């Protein structure tokens, strides 16, 4: 092995962290291989030719340059870590953590640059996921307190939109084309970061078939309960055309199910930038759709129960009272003996028919209740539908 | 009292509420009064609960002029499978749930009675509920009301008090000019 200086050079060159030496004005005096690789610059392009401020993203430069100036002026070292966006030669930005140490003997600054892009993305993603979970918690509480889920959907979409940091959220309900049997999507609610980007007033967003929209794969996947991720680079031509028309870069589309019935979907669009969605975020957005589905299902069940109670009172209780009163009258007619036997027999037959109809009404009401309720066991379903 | 009007030129549509156990007696009282009215030369009874033959016997006993009474009987044929077609001034329908046939029967009967001023009497809204969902009943009442308004005819919808849900009741109130409670209370227009 060589002397100590050789070792120091070896450490400098082979360090996994980008290392720079700059003079007090910030002009690069030396850079290691990792820094060159990371920045995209060759050593000859850096040394004595470029200032470290050139690597700092515009919005972060004032803060970071100020700190660097303070250190060089006071000629002290600082242990603090400074995070900023680092601009590479090809103008791509990465997130970095830097330290600035000042060496009074050589009047130069030693700068370490650590790429924290992946860590930053994970942190941002976790923060977003936590925000979405908070929004879901908010939605659950609001849904529990409200009588009509539709009243609070604008607030809930806004909370989800702000938490997930997307540009637009929309909720579509399915309907069926009576002529063709095709499933159609109908926009019901929307929130947009920029209201001009909203599509809810676009008539094309009503009774739109999945095929016509170029998203036939959505129908297949969403109908099976799968959440869809779409980015403009990887989707097929038809879907790409749809995304371009709406200015969408990437989307997450989560199905809304009412128990096991596919009701529609909630979509999250990013229109402003390319965005990588983590699995955790996508799962959380799926959970948000689940909360919306639960709220709709809860209300549908409540309304069905209320309708059942009201209609059963009308079509069961009242008719039974009518039959009871009719039978009392028939008894009176028999006692008074002024009405012909034929008329009385007809009245008795009518009461039998009325009772048959009341039984049919009960069966129809039960069928109406059970047909949308898959949680009712088949044996019980058969029994009450008979 | 029931069908007379402060404004004799304008026909009235009334909702009459009766205690359930007095529906039959009140039916007789109303028909007696209508047939006595000089302005109302005839009555068309849409009956869903009691057979026309039975009502004819009752009216006859109570001295009602049967010449002034026409029946649209929606129940006898359905319950018995047949009906006596010899009964005068009576149309029998096959099924009380068939509102199309009922509507046609109303239209045809009105046409036949051109020149007269018949009153249409429905007995009863509650009995219709045995055979029809509440939404269909309001559609039918709406149809009858429109006919009455067009021809400036009177109408009476008989119902058991407290036997109708608030939604049906509020819809009936929008169709009618006044509500008469056969216990004595009269609410107007």
Image (tube, grey):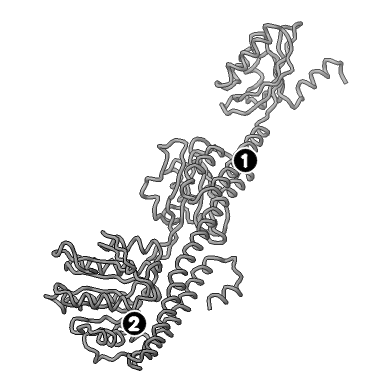
Q: Spot the residue most to the bottom.
A: A341
Q: Are marks 2 and 1 on the same chain?
A: no
Task: Give the structural element (helix, strand or loop) at label 1.
Answer: helix
Q: Quadrant of residue A257?
A: bottom right
Disc 2, SS: loop
- The answer to whether A365 is drawn above or below residue A45 in the figure is below
The quarter of the image holding the N terminus of chain A is: top right
Neighbours of disc 2 within 10 Å: few (<14), some (14-19), many (20+): many
Q: Quadrant of residue A42?
A: top right
The chain containing the residue under callout 1 comes to A
Give the percent coordinates (x, y) of residue B170.
35, 60
Mark 1 Cα within 10 Å, few/some/many (few <14, many 20+)? many
Q: Is residue A26 left or right of residue A9?
A: left
**Quarter of the image where one finds residue A332:** bottom left
Tell me if residue A204 comes above or below residue A115 in the rendering: below
Q: Is residue A106 left or right of residue B111?
A: right
Q: Residue furthest left?
A: B115
Depth check, mark 2 against mark 1: the one in front is 2
Instruction: Kindly identify the residue that appears in the image at 39 percent across and 52 percent down.
Output: A206
Residue beneath the point at 45% across and 82% down: A356
Q: Is residue A151 above or below residue B2?
A: above
Is residue A123 visible from the viewing direction of this image?
yes
Chain label for disc 2? B
Cα–Cα span, label 2 and label 1 = 68 Å
Q: Label 2: which residue? A: B50
Q: Position of residue A50 (x, y in %)?
A: 61, 15
Q: Is residue A320 above or below residue B142?
A: below
| Residue A129 tag number | 1
A228 sits to left or right of B13: right
Residue B36: x and y in percent read 18, 77
Q: Nearer the viewer, residue A22 or B116?
A: B116
């Amino acid at each position: 092995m060589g002397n100590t200086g050789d070792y120091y050079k070896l450490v400098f060159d082979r360090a996994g962290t980008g290392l720079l030496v700059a003079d007090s004005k910030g002009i690069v005096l030396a850079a290691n291989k990792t820094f060159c690789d990371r920045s995209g610059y060759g050593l000859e392009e850096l040394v004595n030719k470029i200032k470290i401020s050139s690597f700092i993203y515009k919005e972060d430069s004032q803060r970071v340059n100020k700190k660097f100036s303070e250190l060089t002026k006071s000629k002290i070292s600082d242990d603090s870590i400074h995070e900023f966006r680092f601009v590479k030669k090809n103008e791509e930005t990465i997130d970095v953590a830097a330290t600035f140490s000042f060496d009074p003997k050589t009047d130069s600054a030693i700068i370490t640059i650590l790429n924290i892009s992946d860590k930053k993305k994970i942190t941002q993603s976790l923060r977003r996921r936590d925000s979405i979970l908070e929004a879901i918690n908010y939605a659950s509480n609001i849904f529990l307190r409200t009588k009509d889920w539709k009243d609070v959907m604008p607030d809930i979409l806004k909370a989800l939109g702000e938490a997930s940091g997307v540009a637009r959220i929309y909720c579509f309900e399915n309907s069926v084309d009576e002529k063709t049997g095709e499933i159609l999507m109908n926009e019901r609610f929307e929130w947009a970061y920029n209201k001009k980007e909203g599509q809810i007033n676009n008539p094309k967003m009503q009774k739109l078939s999945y095929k016509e929209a170029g998203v036939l794969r959505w129908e297949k996947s969403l109908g099976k309960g799968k959440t869809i991720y779409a980015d403009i680079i990887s989707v097929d031509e038809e879907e790409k055309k749809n995304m371009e028309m709406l200015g969408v870069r990437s989307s997450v589309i989560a199905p809304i199910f009412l128990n096991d019935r596919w009701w529609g979907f909630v979509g999250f669009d990013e229109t402003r930038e390319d965005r990588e969605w983590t699995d955790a975020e996508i799962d959380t957005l799926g959970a948000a759709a689940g909360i919306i589905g639960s709220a709709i299902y809860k209300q549908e069940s409540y309304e069905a129960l209320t309708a059942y109670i009201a209609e059963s009172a009308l079509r069961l209780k009242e008719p039974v009272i009518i039959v009871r009163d009719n039978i009392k009258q028939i008894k009176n007619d028999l006692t008074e003996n002024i009405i012909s036997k034929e008329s009385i027999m007809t009245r008795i037959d009518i009461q039998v028919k009325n009772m048959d109809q009341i039984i049919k009404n009960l069966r129809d009401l039960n069928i109406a209740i059970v047909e949308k309720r898959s949680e009712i066991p088949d044996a019980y379903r058969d029994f009450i539908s008979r | 009292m029931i069908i007379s009007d402060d404004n004799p030129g304008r026909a009235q549509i009334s909702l009459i509420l009766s205690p359930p156990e007095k529906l039959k007696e009140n039916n007789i009282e109303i028909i007696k009064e209508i047939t006595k009215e000089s302005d109302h030369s005839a009555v068309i009874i849409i009956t869903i609960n009691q057979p026309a033959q039975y009502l004819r016997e009752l009216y006859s006993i109570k001295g009602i002029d049967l010449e002034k009474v026409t029946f649209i009987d929606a129940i006898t044929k359905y319950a018995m499978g047949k009906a006596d077609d010899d009964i005068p001034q009576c149309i029998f329908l096959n099924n009380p749930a068939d509102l199309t046939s009922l509507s046609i029967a109303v239209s045809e009967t009105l046409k036949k009675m051109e020149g007269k001023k018949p009153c249409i009497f429905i007995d009863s809204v509650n009995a219709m509920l045995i055979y029809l969902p509440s939404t269909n009943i309001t559609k039918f009442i709406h149809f009858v009301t429109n006919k009455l308004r067009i021809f400036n005819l009177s109408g009476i919808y008989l119902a058991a008090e407290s036997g109708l849900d608030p939604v049906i009741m509020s819809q009936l109130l929008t169709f009618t000019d006044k509500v008469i409670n056969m216990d004595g209370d009269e609410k107007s227009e």
